[in-house]
Image: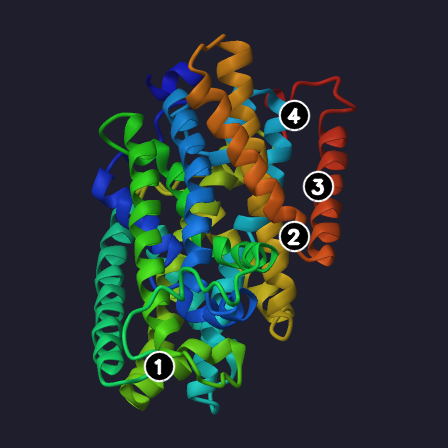
Amino acid sequence: MSLENFGYKQELKRALTFWDLLIYGMIFMVPIAPFGVYGYITDASKGMVALAYMIGMAGMIFTALSYARMSEAFPIAGSVYAYAQRGINDKVGFLAGWAILLDYILVPALLYLVSAAALTALIPSIPMWVWLILFIAVNTVINVFGVEFTAKANKMILILEFIVLGIFIVVGLVALSNGMGNGHLTTKPIYNPGEFNLSLVMGAVSIAVLSFLGFDGISTLSEEVKGGSKMVGKATITALLVVGVLFILQTWVASDLGAGMRLTNLDTAFYEIAGKAGGTWLKNLTIIATAFSWGIANALAAQAAISRILYSMARDRKLPAVLAKVHPTFKTPYISTILVAVVSLAVGLFFQSKIGVLTNIVNFGALTGFLVLHVSVIYHYIIRQKSKDYVRHLILPLIGFLVIGYVIKGMDMTAIKLGVTWIILGAVYLVVITKVFKQSATSLDI
């Protein structure tokens, strides 16, 4: 089904292949994401970090399947916003887009902050705000130049991440064989009967599952893919599985290496383990890799994703029309891209000392969007299309809904309150721009 069938004209350049989408998804999730959050997960799970990632991956698979179903039905940019809008109605679509904005518009700033903080720890003489500006400037230029350029940059960065991950695993296995930690790979990181407690493990899962956020960003590039609507769903599921396996492998090795170690700082737990296994050089390598994979690669993908969502909502006149402007040469939504850069700088400067608060807000937006996605699948296929494929169109999205709901239930209450406040503001904004629903949300002229 072509884009014209949905009332749009093809403005963005179709240049991406399955492999470009796969790389984009893996970059967005960051194959070495556990490096930065390992300490918190091992503390919450009593060392069963690999188990937390296994359960987290299983839960996210259901959400990935829902993305696959909706990307096949509606191969357009906009992600959850577009799927809920087309699958349910305009108003639900707007609120879904508003919720996911909380994730996408803030996550680049979060990624820049984490990276800037890591580099400031290595080079204290350079203030955090300098790194913040540098990361934002580099990523904005790359994204404005075009999605093909972004894809090429992603490939190089992904290769470097794999090299660092490979080095850690090899050095870690050698250290294990030499008697460090448990002395060899054990089943304790997956199941330790002496420490196992379901509520504790699920609490750890609520942290681990956040490492997977970003696989959904693939759907925002639907209008820049060549090869058919099923390509997006296939790439989404594949990226999730590949990165999930890498998460499990690296945390398994790290957990056995860290057995018996007294971790002094949860923020740097992984780096401490790497340092003991391979020395200061490996510790610094993992810190630098984390900083640049989050601050360049992941943030690059995040900025590209949110600019497409802003473009999509502005194209439907739910946001100012200027955000739908496409660069005449590079064929990218450059105004939206620049806006994200400005917001990232402002948010980054404000939350420099409040990274934890920003993280919670971002997570609420993403998970709320996932809830609406699962409902969209059920409503569109079962209620509208009268589908009899109850497994794919009812049972699987229902399981996904319950899993995400359980994760939200265990979130920090402050994040829930702030997230709900954001949704209420969105509802008020919708009432205003639609003149108390007397005007269709798709016929707005902002």
Question: How far apart, in angstroms, are the residues tagged by discs 2 and 3?
Answer: 19 Å
The picture places residue 3, in percent across and down from the top left corner, at 37, 21
* Residue at 58% over, 36% down: 402
Q: Are marks 1 and 4 in contact (CB under 8 Å)?
A: no
Q: Residues under labels 2 and 4: Cα distance?
A: 28 Å
Of mark 4 and mark 3, the one earlier in the sequence is 4
Where is residue 380? Give x, y as percent. Answer: 51, 17
Q: Seen from this angle, which residue lies furthest top?
A: 386
Looking at numbered disc 3 in the image, what kind of residue is underneath it?
Ile
Q: Quadrant of the C terminus?
A: top right
**Looking at the picture, which amino acid does disc 1 mark?**
Gly
Regarding residue 301, the answer to whether it shows in the image is yes
Instruction: Residue at 53%, 69% (x, y): give it.
Output: 40
Q: Position of residue 343 (x, y in %)?
A: 57, 57
For mark 2, give the secondary structure. Answer: loop
Could you tell me which quadrant the N terminus lies in?
A: top left
Colour mapping used in the image? rainbow
* Residue wearing tag 1: 181
Between residue 284 and residue 139, name the one nearer to us: 284
User: Is the C-beta separation of discs 2 and 3 under 8 Å?
Assistant: no
Q: Amino acid at mark 4?
A: Lys
Residue 410's label in the rendered image is 2
> Which label belongs to residue 423?
3
Which residue shows up at 59% across the image and 28% down it? 93
Determine which residue is flagged by label 4: 91
Q: Is residue 335 above or below residue 8?
A: below
Please name whichever residue, 107 or 189, is drawn nearer the observer in this view of the structure: 189
The earlier-in-sequence mark between 1 and 4 is 4
Asked which quadrant contains residue 235, the reply is top left
Q: Earlier in the sequence, mark 1 or mark 3?
A: 1
User: The residue tagged with tag 1: helix, strand or loop?
Assistant: loop
Which is in the foreground here, disc 1 or disc 3?
A: 1
